[in-house]
Image: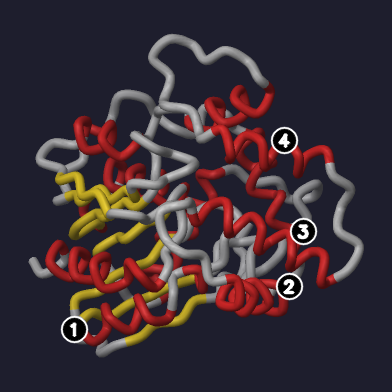
């Protein structure tokens, strides 16, 4: 099934192309405008987009037309095709990093470089690690590092809480989640967070449709191939914040498994992309994508 994917691009068509791939259940505008602006000012053609079932992209009747994360991955290639990109620099955040890693394995000719931010290693079963942590179940030997205690406590409480009844309650909950993911290493700007989450809320066709990403993961739990990261040929930069609450320590594992990959730690950053890190992050991405 084909569906409509919203995307936008910035910069000159002749510049080196960067495709920004956001994480699960997340709109493309979570790539901050200021960060995008720094990339375009550095001579990059930048494309960002909303995954299916997020933002302005089409919402899917999952019961009628179920899909898997393979389909979400294929949407990445469709966005590239729509913008006339035979290949691009993939810059990926969180679960978007799994998509980028898989495309780098399966379709190396389409990946000029790979940048993975706040993600987990392909084949590491990160979703299972988080679920076992939330359920209080032991982790098998060799599992990825667990999320922080604060992360586990927040989502346990969220699962037990009644759904929000009003727009204000929903946005307040979204801000609380952003505060958690922001981590404790940098000041949290609640006014800025409210502006962002109001924008996320107001531009969504159906804010609840994001749950389909979880259903897609359950539809095919073996989505991630195991033991393939050594096949990645694209020059790879792996970035993690020192206050990552969700996937702390995962980036070093990615970097160790991809030949020649470089690991970069950003002081104070958690699992979001706040203004304080835009300059350092953009500088690193521009250097990595300079060819």
SS of the residue under disc 4: helix
Could you tell me how far apart the alpha carbons at marks 4 and 1 are, in whole angstroms?
44 Å
* Residue 29 shows in the view: yes
Q: How is the image coloured?
A: secondary structure
Could you tell me how far apart the alpha carbons at marks 3 and 2 are, in whole angstroms?
9 Å
Label 4 neighbourhood size at 10 Å, few (<14), some (14-19), many (20+)? some
Q: Which residue is mark 1?
A: 43
Q: Quadrant of the N terminus?
A: bottom right
User: Which of the marked residues, 4 or 1, is nearer the chain's N terminus?
Assistant: 1
Point out which mark residue 156 bears.
4
Q: Which residue is mark 3?
A: 208
Q: Would you say the residues marked 4 and 3 are in contact, meaning their CB atoms lie under 8 Å apart? A: no
State the residue at coordinates (18%, 83%): 43
Residue 192 horizontal/vertical position (percent): 56, 77
Could you tell me how far apart the alpha carbons at marks 1 and 3 are, in whole angstroms?
37 Å
Point out which mark residue 205 bears.
2
Picture quadrant of residue 102: top left
Residue 196 horizontal/vertical position (percent): 59, 75
Could you tell me how far apart the alpha carbons at marks 1 and 2 are, in whole angstroms?
33 Å
| Above or below for 248 versus 58 | above
Label 3 neighbourhood size at 10 Å, few (<14), some (14-19), many (20+)? few
Residue 116 horizontal/vertical position (percent): 31, 51
Could you tell me how far apart the alpha carbons at marks 4 and 3 are, in whole angstroms?
19 Å
């Amino acid at each position: 099934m084909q569906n409509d994917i919203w995307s936008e691009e910035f910069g000159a068509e002749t510049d080196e192309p960067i495709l920004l791939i956001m994480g699960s259940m997340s709109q493309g505008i979570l790539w901050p405008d200021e960060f995008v602006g720094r990339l375009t000012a550095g001579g990059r053609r930048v494309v960002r987009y909303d995954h299916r079932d997020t933002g302005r992209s089409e919402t899917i009747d999952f019961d009628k037309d179920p899909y898997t994360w393979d389909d979400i991955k294929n949407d990445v290639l469709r966005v590239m095709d729509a913008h006339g990109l035979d290949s691009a620099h993939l810059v990926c955040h969180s679960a978007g990093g799994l998509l980028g890693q898989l495309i780098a394995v399966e379709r190396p000719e389409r990946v000029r470089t790979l940048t993975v931010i706040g993600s987990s290693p392909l084949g590491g079963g990160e979703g299972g690690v988080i679920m076992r942590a939330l359920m209080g179940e032991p982790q098998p030997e060799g599992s990825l590092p667990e999320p922080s205690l604060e992360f586990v406590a927040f989502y346990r409480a969220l699962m037990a809480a009644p759904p929000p009844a009003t727009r204000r309650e929903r946005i307040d909950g979204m801000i609380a989640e952003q505060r958690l993911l922001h981590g404790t290493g940098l000041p949290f700007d609640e006014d800025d967070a409210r502006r962002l989450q109001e924008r996320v809320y107001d531009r969504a066709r159906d804010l609840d449709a994001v749950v389909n990403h979880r259903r897609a993961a359950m539809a095919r739990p073996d989505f991630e191939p195991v033991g393939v990261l050594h096949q990645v040929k694209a020059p790879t930069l792996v970035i993690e914040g020192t206050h990552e609450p969700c996937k702390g320590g995962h980036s070093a594992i990615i970097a160790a498994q991809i030949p020649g990959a470089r690991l970069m730690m950003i002081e104070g950053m958690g699992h979001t992309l706040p203004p304080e890190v835009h300059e350092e992050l953009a500088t690193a991405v521009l250097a990595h994508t300079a060819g």
